[in-house]
Amino acid sequence: MAKAGKDARKRFKPESLMMSYGYKPELSEGAIKPPVFLTSTFVFKSAEEGKRFFEVAYGHANLDHGEELGLIYSRINNPDMEILEDRLAVWDDADSALVFSSGMAAISTVMLEFLKPGDVLLHSNPLYGGTHHFIHHVLPLWGVHGVAFSPGESEETILQRVADAGAIDKVRLVHIETPANPTNELIDLEMIARIAKKLGATSSVDNTYLGPVFQRPLKFGIDLVLYSATKYIGGHSDLIAGAVAGHAEPVQRVRVLRTFLGNMNGPWTQWLMLRSLETLRVRMDRQAASAKIVADFLLGHPKVERVYYLGHLEAGTAQHAIFQKQCESAGAMISFDVIRGEKAAFRFLNALQLISLAVSLGGTESLIEHPASMTHCDIPLDERAKMGISDKLVRLSIGLEDPHDLISDLDAALREI
Ligand code: PLP
């Protein structure tokens, strides 16, 4: 560790550590920034050293106190990967973190590690469309089935659903998304941690929408935090990546499976992510501040029927109480129903000049999409209707543009309906 070493985590805020934590300039000719280590493999000092590194990397032995795993091969470790994973762990106050080639790689690897044939996955709905597809079309091929619940359901109702499915002793993973994509509904993290504990299961949370700056699920007893790092962590819509952070033991299990699936990412993407982490806090703060201005504008608009935005939750409601407990900001994701249906929504989307019509979120540019026909089109119509994903719904990710310019663009396009 350089000047900002491990004990710095107790002293400084994550945003203060993103420029130096976990990097020793003296190992790289004094360069202030970590170089991109474009190498596939690393030279061992001795055969004994190589043997020890492999024992630890393959999970046959644990690191001794104070021992660090040496560099082996870039599918297992690489300086860019290690610095990046140490810095990601800082945000979630996690023991360790892992990077992946995509958010789906992170999610699918966690599910494959914790679920075996005959096991049951307890999960919330709605989920990102790709996660929904993996649960409904891939996991069943491996003999794993899901039991779903909705935001707003109580602990008793959820446990009753598990009992009704005959799965009380079969649930091995509880996976949720909060806020949910694209409806912004919240689920109580403490309740999920309690349910997982009662069922003897591991808990995982897709924290892509608010994390890692505005929501820290580990604080509420969750075991693993998952990200599409393509979104806010990458932040510039120029890379695809995923991440997992959490307690040492479950992260180590996921690390070993990653080694054999080989779905980590490479040093160049890792380097880009290191650069992005330096501005994560300022980007997310500014995006959230702009989102509030835009959401308030949409609320009163005659062509908008309903706005789904965390900053508009009413005091006294259960959703507001969850927000107060576990979210540090309303974030920068706004969904809203335009009047009428798909035709009107498409007319509006096609008329935008500044905001780009594209899936994804969390980038420097504002992006808008139509979940029913795009990201969530794979979900059967009746299920989609139950989740509140109608043809009127559009999802807007606020970027770094001037919020008043965004309003001007939205207003002009809404007038086209
Ligand atoms: N989780 C959420 C909430 C997402 O929005 C996405 C992608 O849109 C993913 C996971 C999947 O991430 P990736 O596209 O990086 O595989």
Image (cartoon, rainbow, N blue to C red):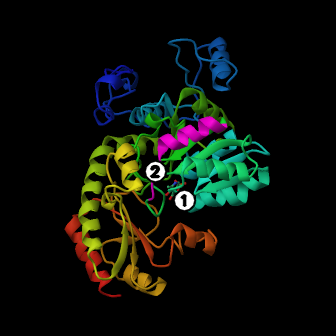
- Please state, as top left, top right, bottom left or bottom right, where the C terminus lies in the image: bottom left
Q: Give the camera-side residue of 65 and 328.
A: 328
Looking at the rendered structure, the kind of residue marked 1 is: Tyr
- Please state, as top left, top right, bottom left or bottom right, where the N terminus lies in the image: top left
Looking at the rendered structure, the kind of residue marked 2 is: Thr
Whether ligand 1 has any atom under 8 Å from the Cβ at mark 2 is answered as yes
Q: Which residue is mark 1?
A: 128
Main SS of residues in magenta: helix
Mark 1 or mark 2: whose residue is earlier in sequence: 1
From the viewer's perspective, is residue 345 above or below residue 144? below
Q: Residues within 10 Å of mark 2 (few under 14, many from 20)?
A: many
Look at the numbered disc 2 and give the secondary structure of its residue.
loop
Label number found at residue 208? 2
- Extent of the magenta region: 185-199
Left or right: residue 253 versus residue 412 is right
Residue 260, image x and y in percent? 69, 37
Residue 47, image x and y in percent? 66, 14
Q: Residues within 10 Å of mark 1 (few under 14, many from 20)?
A: some
**Marks 1 and 2 close (CB-CB < 8 Å):** yes
User: Which residue is at a point 50% across and 12% down the rendered structure image?
Assistant: 66
Look at the numbered disc 1 and give the secondary structure of its residue.
loop
Residue 196, image x and y in percent? 60, 39
